Amino acid sequence: MKIPYYEILLNDTKKIKKLVWNINYRARKMGLPASLSVEELTNILVQYEGKCAVTKRELYAEDFTTDHFIPLDWKIVGSCKENIVPMKGGINSYKKNMSPFEFYYRFTMFGRRDCDENWNNLITYMRKMYKFEEKVDFFSFIRFCWFIQKNPHYFLMVGQPLEIVKNMYLSIMDKYSIDGKHNYYTHKAMRELDISFFLENKILKTEW
């Protein structure tokens, strides 16, 4: 009888320490924050009972992976407790560096709708981890993280941790809010992604 891999991890200190080291190393070698701890990964695995966050199916040694919700290729946020979920290897490979929402849209394009509840639960969990009260704000933040890659000043954001990226997002959204509501879809906000705006608002570190 196969044993779910997370049960093996929770009972093998060396294995889970090695897994955490590998997760952090992937971020570290790209110059990204790498702060995930054994305790944090343990809590994440317990939260999902070691199952795939998308399908809720058991994960065994041959198909167990952890996914960075905001992809490492975006070169922000990195390996932290807010950004890690367990995921089946094949699904993780398919997701690659896509936006989470684009990934799920494509995942369901051909009638795969049996995971909607799991996906909604995942988004609720991630929204709480990222400390957004409203789903629409969380969606806008993820879209913002994707959008800044396309900005000519993107290099300023490389390697920034979640807190700084989120503060920048909130500062820009507050500046262009309408009736107290964030209006992400105005590209005027995106045009404010310049050095002077960053430094005036002390959003980015200045010791470059």
Image (spheres, rainbow, N blue to C red):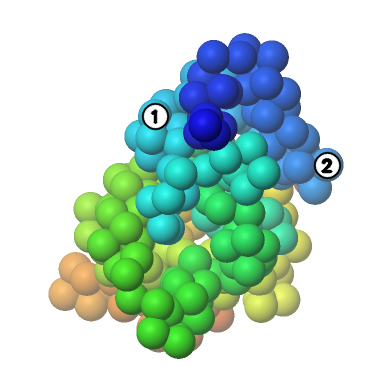
Quadrant in which the C terminus is drawn: top right
> Looking at the image, which residue sits at the far right?
29
Vertical order, 3 against 83 (above or below) = above
As drawn, is 9 to the left or to the right of 73? left
Among the 4 quarters of the image, the one containing residue 112: bottom left
Among the 4 quarters of the image, the one containing residue 109: bottom left
Q: Which badge, 1 or 2, is on the more N-terminal residue?
A: 2
Kind of residue sitting beneath label 2: Lys
Name the residue at 45% across, 36% down: 50
Do we see residue 89 in this rendering? yes
As drawn, is 189 to the left or to the right of 74? left
Vertical order, 17 against 47 (above or below) = above
**Where residue 11 sits: x, y (%)?**
54, 14
Q: Which residue is mark 1?
A: 46
The tag on residue 29 is 2
> Looking at the image, which residue sits at the far left?
179
Name the residue at 63% across, 54% down: 89
**Where residue 99 sits: x, y (%)?**
54, 70
Local crowd size for mark 2, using a 10 Å CA cut-off: few (<14), some (14–19), many (≥20): few
